[in-house]
Image (spheres, rainbow, N blue to C red):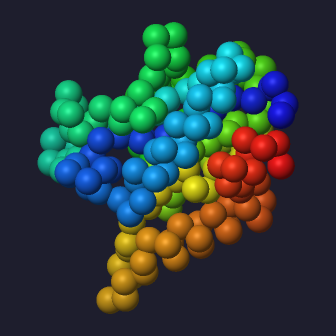
């Protein structure tokens, strides 16, 4: 595993879990896999970036400022010294100092876990690639939800697979937690 890697955990926040304001399909399992990856980075002393979405719209129904739902989930809760980047858009690089913080680590590759696959994960990977980073997305450490389009429900598993397959074509290498941790 290249030591010039950084870990980015996107929006793994309480509102996306059962009992939260906007639960996703498979969020608990994804967070457990993200925790395993996070533990590896902590063991190695490699840089970790926690991305936390805070809603700015007063009408927002989730990730409301200072709410328990906006807090980062206990499975991937930041430790003292780990960077937390607050964002207000799906793209974690927009309006934040994230790219500068990553460049300071000299990491060229970002390993990414997080939520939602079809929104903030996708936006971060595409924007980061355009800024010169390489990505490894841990597919089973990401989660999403069912979507509706033109009266048809697209189930979360299909949304997840479609977005990961699109990212895997050019923007990232998509791996499982097992394969990543085993160095495959």
Residue that lies at the very extreme toward the left in this rendered image: 59
Confirm whether residue 83 shows in the render: yes
Q: Is residue 5 above or below residue 139?
A: above
The answer to which of 97 and 177 lies nearer the viewer is: 177
Horizontal side of 71 relative to 116 (left or right) equals left
Q: Work out which quarter of the rendered image holds the N terminus and state it.
A: top right
Q: Name above or below for residue 167 compared with residue 86.
A: below
Left or right of 157: which side holds 70? left
Q: Residue at x 81, y 25 (%)?
A: 3
Q: For the point 62% across and 37% down, which residue is it?
A: 37
User: Number of numbered discs present?
Assistant: 0
**Residue drawn at (67%, 67%) of the image:** 166
Q: Is residue 53 visible?
A: no
Where is residue 75 shown, x and y percent of the image? 42, 35
Q: Work out which residue is located at the far top of the displayed protein and give it.
A: 81
- Residue 35 placed where, x, y %? 52, 37
Is 43 located above or below residue 143 in the figure?
Answer: above
Quarter-wise, where is residue 39 in the image?
top right
Residue at image location 26% in from the left, 53% down from the top: 18
Closest to the observer: 58 or 41? 41
Q: Position of residue 137 (x, y in %)?
A: 66, 50
Q: Quadrant of residue 144?
A: bottom left
Residue 124: x and y, percent? Answer: 57, 45
In the image, residue 153 above or below residue 117: below
Question: Does residue 96 appear to the left or right of 132 in the view shown?
Answer: left
């Amino acid at each position: 595993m290249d030591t010039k890697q950084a870990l980015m955990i996107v929006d793994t926040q309480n509102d996306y879990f059962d009992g939260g304001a906007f639960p996703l399909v498979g969020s608990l399992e994804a967070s457990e896999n993200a925790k395993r990856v996070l533990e590896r980075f902590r063991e190695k002393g490699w840089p970790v970036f926690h991305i936390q979405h805070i809603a700015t719209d007063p009408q927002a129904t989730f990730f409301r400022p200072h709410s328990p739902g906006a807090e980062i989930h206990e499975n991937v809760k930041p430790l003292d010294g780990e960077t937390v980047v607050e964002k207000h858009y799906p793209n974690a690089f927009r309006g934040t100092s994230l790219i500068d913080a990553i460049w300071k680590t000299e990491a060229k590759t970002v390993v990414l876990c997080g939520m939602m696959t079809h929104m903030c994960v996708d936006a971060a990977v595409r924007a980061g690639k355009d800024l010169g980073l390489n990505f490894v997305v841990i597919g089973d450490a990401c989660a999403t939800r069912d979507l509706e389009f033109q009266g048809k429900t697209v189930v979360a598993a299909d949304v997840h697979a479609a977005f990961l397959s699109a990212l895997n074509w050019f923007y990232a290498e998509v791996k499982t937690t097992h394969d990543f941790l085993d160095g495959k």
